[in-house]
Amino acid sequence: MFFVLTAPPQSLPLLLCNNHPNFHLPNKTQFQKFKLSKKWRCSASSKQPQQQQNQPRKKEEPSTSEKRVDPVGFLTRLGITHRAFSQFLRERHKALKNRKDEIFDRFINLKELASGHELLGVHRHPQHRADFMEWAPGARYCALVGDFNDWSPTENSAREGHLGHDDYGYWFVILDDKLRDGEEADDLYFQQYNYVDDYDKGDSGVSIHEIFQKANDEYWEPGEDRFLKSRYEVASKLYEQMFGPNGPQTMEELGDIPDAETRYEAYREQHKDKPPEFFRYDVIDSEKEYDIYNVVDDPISREKFRKKKPPLAYWFETRKGRKAWMKKYNPRLPHGSKYRVYFNTPNGALERVPAWATYVLPDVEENQACAVHWDPPLESAHKWRNKPPKLSKSLRIYECHVGISGLEPKITSFNDFTEKTLPFIKELGYNAVQLFGVIEHKDYFTAGYRVTNMYAVSSRYGTPEDFKRLVDEAHGLGLLVFLDIVHSYSAADEMVGLSHFDGTNDCYFHTGKRGQHKYWGTRMFKYGDVDVLQYLLSNLNWWVEEYQIDGFQFHSLSSMIYTHNGFATFTGELEEYCNQYVDRDALMYLIMANDILHALHPNIITIAEDVTHYPGLCEPTSQGGLGFDYYVNTSASEMWLSFLENVPDNKWSMSKIVTTLMGNKLYADKMILYAENHNQSISGGRSFAEILFGNIEEQSPKSTDLLLRGSSLHKLIRLITFTIGGRAYLNFMGNEFGHPKKVEFPTASNNFSLELANRRWDLLTDQGFYSDLFSFDKDMMKLDQTERVLSRGLLNVHHVNDDTMVISYMRGPLLFIFNFHPTNSYERYSVGVEEAGEYQIILNTDEKKYGGRDIISSEQYLKRSIRKRIDGLQDCLQVLLPSRTAQVYKLSRILRV
């Protein structure tokens, strides 16, 4: 017999991960770029010359991915020289390599690190049982309690001693299924069941013994199966060959055995007259490292051995289907069972909702919270019908909260949202839905930002199957689904949350002040702990694999990046991003999160919400960045709110509007802009509609001017925010038609009322003020669909006049002109154009169908440029520009001069 140690290309990272100091999770093309040193080349064929074994070993070259890594690459590209920040990036990169080394001591690769959901929590095992695993390093005893065992803390517990948990504090509980009355145990103790299909080949009625006999007959060649029947035949033959038929029978008779090298030389001398074919199996030993594995073998035998396949097909024929299991066994943990995990700790016994639970009831009729085992039968489980839509070059994101998406003052369900709101979003023209408040949280008034159970959809909206249907239907309508993910902090709840999970204060979170948010009363994660990293990274992977989520907005990064949680004055100096208040572990977590997500799911979208605009948010991680696809420009909304509340209309600065909305030109294509998101409506503030219109229902007919002002500014603010920014725009549901009231979640201050926790869709049924704004937003989205506004290159802002309050810019063949002046209209206002030609108005905010005055007649919609140098351009348009209006022109015909 001979041995050949080989490794297929796809397994090379698995071999290298623990030995490569800078291993990154590679993509498919990178898998082929890994090069093995001779240290790993443990096979040798007869064609390999022996003299090559004696050549000096070359120094192993670094991998391609390692060569490309430059910790300060984006600073070099941008020409930024800052010693302290550059040093911080280099130290962070070195610390990241050390962190990965620590990870690879326990995990094969980063994919395994991010796949904890495949092991932890409750999982059905093919051998008619359920396995439960939980991380609780501070506990001394662990058991699963629930209605399935009358909440007994002793019936289903982890084994005592080391077998019950490992060195890292992971507890393991086995829940064996129960045989039904009159049924007998399986013939094989390792009999497996396929829980996906109702029937399997093992249900055919053919006995296991017949299947095994058939496997043996086809696998073994004639005469080979005798070694199975006589275990000592091979050993006795070798013994007789070595010592003869009357060899020694005791150790004393055996005496001293010469060493292997002496016996080998004697063997060669004894058979020196044999032809070379006699020595077809031999061992090369030139006293080099790993020579013991270099076996010279017979090519014919090797090929024959490799073609030999084990009888796995027959093994699968023994696996029974789900119905066979249901007929024979009762599940120990049935679908819908309520359960908790029970710990005995140094401070006493306690019960917790498992950290990896996928369905949770946070408050069951004022009783203790509990998890629900979710394993629905096949006929009830959701079957995916639609594939995720292709990524668009522009993102038009509709931000939603499921609970307040209904018309009635109640908590709206996933099913209602799917049937009523999703078609509405599609009609509006948006191509992505961003959901917040979906992940389980105990307190509804927090809008879902104090998450208690990272792996569970909120039970107040429906079941996991209901949410899968929501995502599936959204994909069928061509809508991407993004999730607002909160990994920057966690709820401080103990029973249903993670705080003091195993009785200690430092299981998932920091201790002391570092473990508490400075103002919000939430807990802060230990991003430097490998087990916490596994929990958070697996959580991202879980939402994509289980619910086919298309992207994540990482909420409030400033809360996690800084130990002061972002509550500090920022001047923009780079020292503020690398001082003692910066959490380097949090930054390394974000880098790994983006690397893993983009490697495992190439079409995923990651969005950074950071009010401090940390340098390198959207730069590649290989160049010192954090690796996000987009970042949110929060400054725009703050500017509009400040103007509306504090600055008279005639004092608005056009220069400030342009500067704020354009943001950093280097990252214009990575920017998401919004006029207002949910913060103005939910977080204690007023929406723009409240500020602009007040209470419309109580206004007298004399308030027409107020409504006209509000409507005009509402359209101007949205149009310039939509068209002047990057490739992405966001709007919070209802704001597009000027929803009249803010959102108030039920709290003690409003007697827990749901009257303001809804959306007034009924306002759109009548043709009037709200439907006019709705029509404008719909046509604004259509403008991007037909003219690809957001996906065009950088725009040319060539006219910004603070005196006339006029802004004009071009984006491809489109010309945008805004007049923000509250009173001044201009008969023949001149703005420069890049091309001489005829320009056609394709969107006018003052049209009657949008609630405007309709000053510009249809005959004036076509304009021809004149040869006059304006704004540094040799041609210009002279347009009618009423006050508080905007026009979008398209170059319809080029005139050759």
Image (cartoon, rainbow, N blue to C red):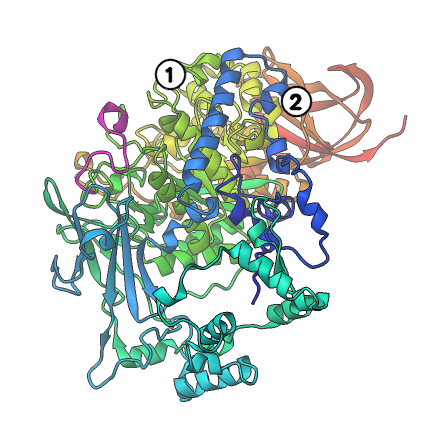
**Residue with the mark numbered 1:** 580
Examine the structure image and report whether residue 507 is included in the region drawn in magenta: yes
Label 2, residues with CA under 10 Å away: few <14, some 14-19, many ≥20: many
> Could you tell me which quadrant the C terminus lies in?
top right
Name the spot of residue 535 as percent of width and height, x first.
35, 44
Q: Secondary structure at mark 2?
A: strand
Q: Which residues are magenta?
A: 502-516
Q: Secondary structure at mark 1?
A: loop
Q: Name the N-terminal-most of marks 2 and 1.
A: 1
**Residue with the mark numbered 2:** 808
544 vs 138: above or below: below
Q: Which mark is residue 390?
A: none
Name the spot of residue 129 as percent of width and height, x first.
29, 68
Examine the structure image and report whether residue 837 is included in the region drawn in magenta: no
Amino acid at the residue labelled 2: Ser
Q: Quadrant of residue 815?
A: top right
Front residue of 339 and 115: 115
Dominant secondary structure, magenta = loop
- Residue at the image point whose x is 22% and y is 38% from the top: 499
Q: Quadrant of residue 106?
A: top left
Name the spot of residue 895 as percent of width and height, x first.
86, 30
Q: Is residue 117 visible?
A: yes
Residue at far left of view: 348
217 vs 654: above or below: below
